[in-house]
Image (tube, helix red, strand yellow):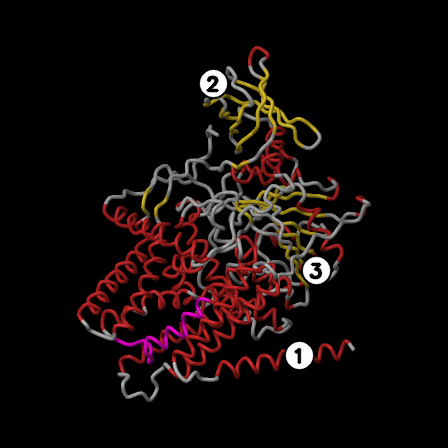
């Protein structure tokens, strides 16, 4: 019966695909019929999403409608619009026609592979550990560092000490690839192990491999030095590995408690999902269904036996994490993704740092594509091949994105046709297809990615990752590992002219195209419907480019550690025996803001004791009043003992539920609202670009200064 049901499923799947292709290839007698069909499909999808949004069968139905519309558009585009044999198409127009067609072909492949990855997230739950704590396994916690300041690393080490796990089964190792005496001293002070290797080949991968040969725990937990784990990290992850002997690693999300450059510079922190939330909130959960979870280098627990089998971390590319996971999957090991944030780190502090990080990722993924081509890699299942392929193809989006941003200019400036079709046919096929893909992705992504922001993120990276990915395709061995900077202050606002230069060029070109199109419209130089359609495309491009320009305005960032909204009851013991009660509003490593239950007589500079109840005891911290009004007081912590600092890390970062549902937006995606947001940001961005070009001064970054005396 089981064999018959599997055979029946395959039969109906193949039959459905053949029927889909047949219907998609059936030509419409005229553009009006196609417009009615496309409008009906879009209306049906809109009704489903509006009435029954969130149900899995609705999402699968929307995917089916979107695939049908896309296949139908692709068939028409391939067979009817390339101008082959058409005497009305000039020879010089063919390059423009086929360049745009190639970019569209790329987008269709990405769309289909994206639906495969995200159609049915596994939504895995944590597995329970044995009740007998004595049977829990040994875990080595590795914290690799290179050139980061100790102020960044201290909370991670203290948080690792706070992890709830039998002390005799947990060993913490500080891996210092910078050979710094202050790191060795801090390791000795905290009672953890310190490892520094004599040579420094292969960057982070080599650092970890050196430590793996000198440790022996059954499992290895890895944290980047700014990723601070919660106390429940091991208890939520190790159970999955214990239950499944064939499981190589459990990956958890990378959550960032500081705003990324988009959130900071556009002032949308916690209002829009951050740039990485789509991957960790949707894609990784979808990969897990196909046993294709990608190892991300941190916030992970790995089985030592699996790492030993592949001789440690991959060292052939600059993205050692993804390369390691594909090697494990090729050897038949399983992987798991637990979509529960159990650690939090610092986002890149500026747009330039963000782009440098993504350049390394892009180069590394293309290196893997060349060295471990997933389509040819033995040992991978077909779904695994396709999931890895999509992850690698994403970083080849730079050229297609630039093509989409400039394609209409050929017609607006020079009258060169990029479609061998009339505007009515283009609109009747393309607009419903685009609309259905927007609806479907809005339903899939929900609060994890809002409409149109994919284009903003791709546009930001496009001019910068094109050359590195091209070189990686030609010669994979080029390039070196670069550590992502996470620390540093920006003392004053400024417009980053250097990073914005390619976006300014694209903006000027499209703005010129807009005026050229208006002149064509008013002067009658071309078909009016074609001019209108091309102008609409250009306006869309200006909105995307304008939003990217807005991100180039770097807002001031005067704190090394951002304030985190936390609510605890607090008791304040002041001078003369005064006792004051209140509630915390936000905290950082350096201070706390408190909302008092009633006004109190406190003076700036007064030294007090702060008492915060958490878990089974009261935690006390010395502090100084640095600012106040009637019911709100700001305190800076006085120098803390090591135990007090460890307690503060526990309260601030170590709570088991500290990061649950953070990183996603407050509301689900709304296409029209998202379009309006992008429009507003585009207007702001174009104004900022003009101001930045003519009036903005150089950056006010203080680089890697050590934090001292920051106000809460």
Rendering coords of residue 465 (x, y %): 41, 61
Mark closer to the chain start, 3 or 1? 1
Question: For mark 2, what is the residue?
Answer: 605
For image coordinates 74% across by 59% down, the residue present is 244
Q: Residue 260 vs residue 615: left or right? A: left
Please name which of the two marks, 2 or 3, marks the residue nearer to the observer: 2
In this rendering, is residue 71 above or below 462?
below
Please name which of the two marks, 3 or 1, marks the residue nearer to the observer: 1
Q: Are marks 2 and 1 in contact (CB under 8 Å)?
A: no
Question: For mark 1, what is the residue?
Answer: 10
Foreground residue among 533 and 552? 533
Question: For mark 3, what is the residue?
Answer: 247
The secondary structure type at the circle numbered 3 is strand
- Determine the CA span between mark 3 and mark 1: 28 Å
- Determine the CA span between mark 2 and mark 3: 55 Å
The stretch drawn in magenta includes residue 429:
yes
The secondary structure type at the circle numbered 1 is helix
Magenta segment boundaries in residue numbering: 416-435
Q: Main secondary structure of the magenta part?
A: helix
């Amino acid at each position: 019966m089981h064999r018959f049901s599997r055979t029946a499923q395959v039969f109906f799947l193949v039959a459905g695909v053949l029927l889909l292709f047949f219907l998609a290839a059936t030509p419409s007698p005229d553009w009006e019929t196609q417009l009615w069909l496309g409008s009906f499909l879009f209306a049906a999808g809109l009704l489903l999403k509006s009435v029954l949004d969130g149900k899995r069968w609705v999402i699968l139905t929307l995917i089916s409608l979107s695939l049908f519309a896309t296949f139908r558009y692709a068939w028409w585009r391939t067979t009817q619009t390339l101008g082959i044999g058409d005497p009305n198409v000039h020879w010089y127009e063919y390059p423009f026609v086929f360049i745009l067609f190639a970019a569209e072909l790329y987008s269709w492949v990405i769309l289909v592979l994206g639906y495969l990855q995200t159609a049915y997230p596994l939504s895995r739950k944590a597995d329970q550990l044995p009740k007998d704590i004595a049977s829990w396994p040994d875990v080595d916690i590795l914290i690799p560092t290179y050139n980061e300041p100790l102020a960044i690393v201290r909370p991670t080490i203290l948080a690792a000490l706070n992890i709830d796990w039998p002390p005799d089964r947990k060993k913490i190792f500080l891996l210092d690839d910078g050979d710094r005496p202050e790191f060795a001293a801090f390791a000795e002070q905290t009672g953890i192990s310190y490892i520094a290797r004599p040579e420094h080949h292969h960057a982070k991968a080599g650092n970890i491999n050196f430590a793996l040969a000198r440790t022996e725990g059954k499992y290895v937990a890895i944290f980047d030095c700014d990723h601070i784990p919660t106390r429940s990290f091991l208890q939520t992850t190790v159970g999955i590995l214990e239950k499944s002997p064939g499981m190589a690693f459990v990956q958890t999300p990378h959550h960032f408690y500081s705003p990324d450059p988009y959130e900071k510079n556009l002032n949308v922190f916690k209002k829009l999902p951050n740039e990485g939330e789509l991957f960790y909130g949707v894609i990784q959960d979808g990969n897990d269904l196909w046993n294709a979870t990608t190892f991300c280098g941190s916030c992970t627990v790995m089985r030592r036996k699996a790492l030993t089998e592949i001789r440690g971390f991959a060292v052939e590319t600059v993205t050692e994490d993804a390369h390691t996971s594909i090697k494990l999957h090729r050897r038949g090991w399983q992987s798991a993704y637990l979509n529960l944030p159990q650690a939090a780190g610092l986002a890149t502090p500026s747009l330039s740092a963000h782009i440098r990080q993504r350049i390394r990722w892009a180069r590394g993924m293309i290196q893997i594509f060349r060295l471990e081509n997933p389509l040819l890699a033995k040992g991978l299942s077909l779904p695994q091949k396709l999931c890895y392929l999509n992850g690698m193809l994403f970083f080849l989006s730079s050229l297609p994105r630039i093509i989409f941003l400039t394609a209409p200019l050929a017609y607006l400036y020079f009258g060169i046709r990029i479609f061998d079709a009339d505007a009515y046919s283009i609109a009747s096929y393309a607009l419903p297809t685009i609309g259905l893909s927007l609806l479907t992705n809005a339903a899939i992504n929900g609060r994890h990615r809002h409409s149109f922001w994919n284009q903003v993120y791709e546009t930001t990276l496009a001019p910068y990752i094109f050359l590195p990915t091209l070189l990686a395709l030609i010669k994979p061995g080029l390039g070196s590992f670069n550590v992502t900077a996470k620390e540093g202050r920006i003392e004053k606002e400024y417009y980053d002219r250097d990073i914005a230069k390619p976006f300014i060029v694209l903006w000027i070109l499209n703005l010129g195209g807009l005026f050229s199109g208006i002149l064509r419209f008013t002067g009658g130089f071309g078909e009016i419907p074609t001019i209108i359609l091309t102008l609409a495309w250009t306006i869309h491009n200006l909105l995307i480019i304008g939003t990217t320009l807005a991100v180039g305005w770097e807002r001031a960032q005067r704190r090394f550690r951002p304030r985190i909204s936390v609510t605890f009851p607090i008791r304040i013991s002041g001078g003369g025996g005064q006792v004051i009660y209140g509630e915390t509003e936000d905290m950082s490593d350096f201070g706390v803001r408190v909302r008092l239950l009633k006004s109190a007589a406190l003076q700036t500079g007064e030294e007090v004791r702060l008492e915060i109840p958490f878990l089974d005891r009261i935690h006390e911290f010395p502090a100084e009043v640095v600012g106040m009004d009637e019911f709100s007081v700001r305190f800076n912590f006085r120098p803390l003992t090591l135990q007090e600092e460890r307690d503060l890390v526990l309260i601030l970062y170590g709570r088991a539920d500290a990061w649950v549902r953070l990183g996603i937006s407050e509301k689900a995606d709304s296409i029209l609202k998202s379009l309006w947001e992008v429009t507003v940001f585009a207007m702001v961005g174009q104004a900022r670009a003009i101001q930045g070009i003519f009036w903005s001064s150089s950056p006010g970054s203080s680089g890697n200064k050590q934090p001292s005396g920051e106000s809460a």
